[in-house]
């Protein structure tokens, strides 16, 4: 990794001519967090989004088709040079987050992509803001790593990317969001995250067992809280530091999430699902997963449990994260009640997109009740 020596970052407004809006290059604009970042940043910046294939079709941004893993981002030498002259700030949010991707591809995408953005930022004499993850703090056991290599590769790649930024000499900051929820007001989110799938399955009673203790914390933060904090750091010209965009001590407990899903089901005419049986994490590898592999359970149920086991082994915390929200540089922290309310709004948004599923689920419940009475 090359070493760069640049002057400290300065507030964006002073890097552009008077009356001009600074130009911010965003990667990952088509992702869940990227869409929300466009909402947050488009009023104050000229946004240039680097994308590989899928167009954004968003009039608020100018799109450049390129490739993070190609030399000069896949651009011609002249186009790359012009981009470096134009850019005032770089926000690197793109990452391979699918844990089903081969581990080597996860590591390659997330580390080489960061290196490419650092190189561009150095050429542009621009600060770089890296979106990492709070779960770099999660210590996976060797057994976790062997059973869930995708999750391990993802965390390793984020740890490496952070170190590359720290040692590069490029000014900027590292931000570490925890689990990103939908918007705190509308509940909407650009794509289905693992959290959205998990809470939806809990509402439908499709999660009889979960790995974790009832008092384990699941740190989650609404996407607008995360993007507002990132926007505050950028607008304030923060040129160094690492920021935890987390709920911290306000994070809900696993049993609270399960209870909220149960209450939501009842309010929408569904039977109250049984609270998932919570299995101690240390017993998941030793007993439950090996047992599942040797049973006649439907393949879909086995896959679903293994998916949730992977998520929760990474995402749950018995102790709260630190949180930078509410500090002098980034945003305001959500309260415990704010997060519970946001969870309900996320469920409402999920239900809007699953009206057919809920209708069929209610119909099956009624049919089962009639059959039981008839017998």
Image: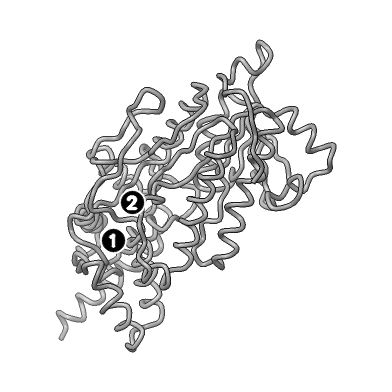
Residue at image location 39% in from the left, 64% down from the top? 357
Residue ID for mark 1: 203
| Mark count | 2
- Quarter that holds the C terminus: bottom left
> Pointer 2: residues within 10 angstroms few (<14), some, or many (20+)?
many
69 or 301, nearer to the observer: 69
Q: Nearer the viewer, residue 111 or 189?
A: 111
Q: Give the residue number, with chain letter if any, for mark 2.
A: 347
Side of 301 where 210 appears, left or right: left
Q: CA distance from mark 1 to mark 2?
A: 9 Å
Residue 265: x %, y % from top left: 25, 58
Q: Is residue 46 above or below residue 371?
A: above
Would residue 33 be found to the left or right of residue 370 on screen?
right
Identify whether 269 is placed above or below 326: below
Instruction: Check contact, mark 1 vs mark 2: CB within 8 A.
Output: yes
Which of these two is toward me, 86 or 108?
108
Residue occupying image coordinates x 41% and y 35%: 243
Q: Is residue 127 left or right of residue 306?
A: right
Q: Position of residue 308 (x, y in %)?
A: 35, 66
Note whether 230 is above or below 153 in the view shown.
Answer: above
Would residue 342 be seen by someone viewing this image from the given angle? yes
Query: Mark 1, residues whose alpha carbon is within 10 Å: few (<14), some, or many (≥20)?
Result: many
Residue 120 at x, y = what percent?
69, 37
Q: Nearer the viewer, residue 84 or 203?
A: 84
Q: Which is more N-terminal, label 2 or label 1? A: 1
Q: Element under label 2?
A: helix
Residue at image point 81% right, 37% down: 79
């Amino acid at each position: 990794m090359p070493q760069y020596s640049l002057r400290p970052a300065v507030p964006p407004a002073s890097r552009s001519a008077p009356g001009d809006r600074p130009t911010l290059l965003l990667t990952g604009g088509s992702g869940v967090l990227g869409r929300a970042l466009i909402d947050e940043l488009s009023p104050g910046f000229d946004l240039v989004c680097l994308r590989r294939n899928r167009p954004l079709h968003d009039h608020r941004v100018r799109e450049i088709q390129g490739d993070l893993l190609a030399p000069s981002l896949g651009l011609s030498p002249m186009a790359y040079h012009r981009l470096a002259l134009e850019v005032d700030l770089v926000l690197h949010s793109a990452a391979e987050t699918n844990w089903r991707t081969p581990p080597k591809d996860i590591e390659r995408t997330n580390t080489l992509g960061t290196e490419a953005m650092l190189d561009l930022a150095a050429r542009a004499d621009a600060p770089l803001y890296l979106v990492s993850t709070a779960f770099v703090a999660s210590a996976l056991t060797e057994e976790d790593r062997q059973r869930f290599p995708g999750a391990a590769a993802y965390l390793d790649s984020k740890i490496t990317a952070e170190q590359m930024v720290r040692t590069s000499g490029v000014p900027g900051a590292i931000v570490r969001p925890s689990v990103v929820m939908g918007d705190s007001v509308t509940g909407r989110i650009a794509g289905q995250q693992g959290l959205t799938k998990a809470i939806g399955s809990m509402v439908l009673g499709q999660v009889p067992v979960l790995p974790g203790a009832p008092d384990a914390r699941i740190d989650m933060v609404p996407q607008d809280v995360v993007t507002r904090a990132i926007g505050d750091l950028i607008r304030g010209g923060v040129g160094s530091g690492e920021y935890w965009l987390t709920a911290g001590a306000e994070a809900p407990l696993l049993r609270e999430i399960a209870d909220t899903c149960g209450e939501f089901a009842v309010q929408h005419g569904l039977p109250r699902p049984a609270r998932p049986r919570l299995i101690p994490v240390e017993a998941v590898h030793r007993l439950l997963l090996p047992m599942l592999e040797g049973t006649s359970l439907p393949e879909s149920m086995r896959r679903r449990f293994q998916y949730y086991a992977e998520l929760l082994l990474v995402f749950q915390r018995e102790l709260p994260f630190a949180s930078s929200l509410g500090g002098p540089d980034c945003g305001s922290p959500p309260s415990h009640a704010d997060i519970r309310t946001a969870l309900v709004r996320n469920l409402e948004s999920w239900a809007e997109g699953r009206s057919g599923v809920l209708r069929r689920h209610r119909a099956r419940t009624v049919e089962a009740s009639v059959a039981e009475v008839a017998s």
